[in-house]
Image (cartoon, helix red, strand yellow):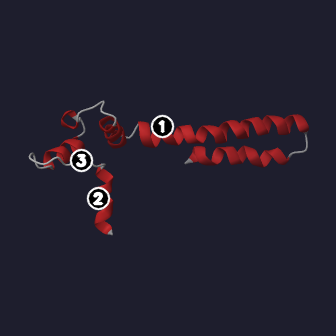
Amino acid sequence: MVLLGTGWFFGIFMQIPQPEFQVMMQYIFILLNSTQGCFVFLCYVILNEQVTTYWLHRFGFKDKDSAKSSQAKTQTNALPKNTDAKYEFPARSQDNVQI
């Protein structure tokens, strides 16, 4: 969360009337705000084991029987063996319970 407000901290200093300082603050502001999307993608998609397992299975790089996470194994084993049930992202079924 600290990273998300850091760019605006430097954005406030762009109001100082020295042109050289303003340009430097603008570059820092742009650099920090443009890297926020990469940081969020890294932390909440790449480093999240459930999301990574889902997308690896979706693209066919990982078989759902060889999933390493215990939650993915529990969900895979919970499916009946004689049906062709689709792999579902674990958060979807849990989120819909409250509706």
Q: Helix or strand or loop: what does disc 3 sit on?
A: loop
| Image location of residue 78, percent across then percent down | 14, 49
Q: Residues within 10 Å of mark 2 (few under 14, many from 20)?
A: few
Residue holding disc 2? 94
Q: Amino acid at mark 2?
A: Gln
**Dot 3 and dot 1 residues touching (CB under 8 Å):** no
Lower sequence index among marks 2 and 3: 3
Q: Which residue lies most toward the front here?
A: 84
Q: Indicate the quadrant containing the C terminus: top left, top right, bottom left or bottom right.
A: bottom left
- 46 shown above or below 79: above
Q: CA distance from mark 2 to mark 1?
A: 24 Å
Residue 35, quarter of the rendered image: top right
What residue is shown at x 27% (from left), y 32% (from top)? Answer: 62
Q: Residues within 10 Å of mark 3 (few under 14, many from 20)?
A: few
Q: Helix or strand or loop: what does disc 1 sit on?
A: helix
Q: Residues within 10 Å of mark 1 (few under 14, many from 20)?
A: few
Lower sequence index among marks 2 and 1: 1
What residue is shown at x 31% (from left), y 63% (from top)? Answer: 96
- 97 shown above or below 66: below
Q: CA distance from mark 3 to mark 1?
A: 27 Å
Q: Which residue lies most toward the left here?
A: 82
Q: Helix or strand or loop: what does disc 2 sit on?
A: helix
Q: Amino acid at mark 3?
A: Lys
Residue 42 numbered tag = 1
Q: Amino acid at mark 1?
A: Leu
Observer-nearest residue: 95 or 28? 95
**Dot 2 and dot 3 residues touching (CB under 8 Å):** no
Observer-nearest residue: 95 or 7? 95
Residue holding disc 3? 86
Lower sequence index among marks 3 and 1: 1
What residue is shown at x 19% (from left), y 42% (from top)? Answer: 73
| Image location of residue 11, percent across then percent down | 75, 46
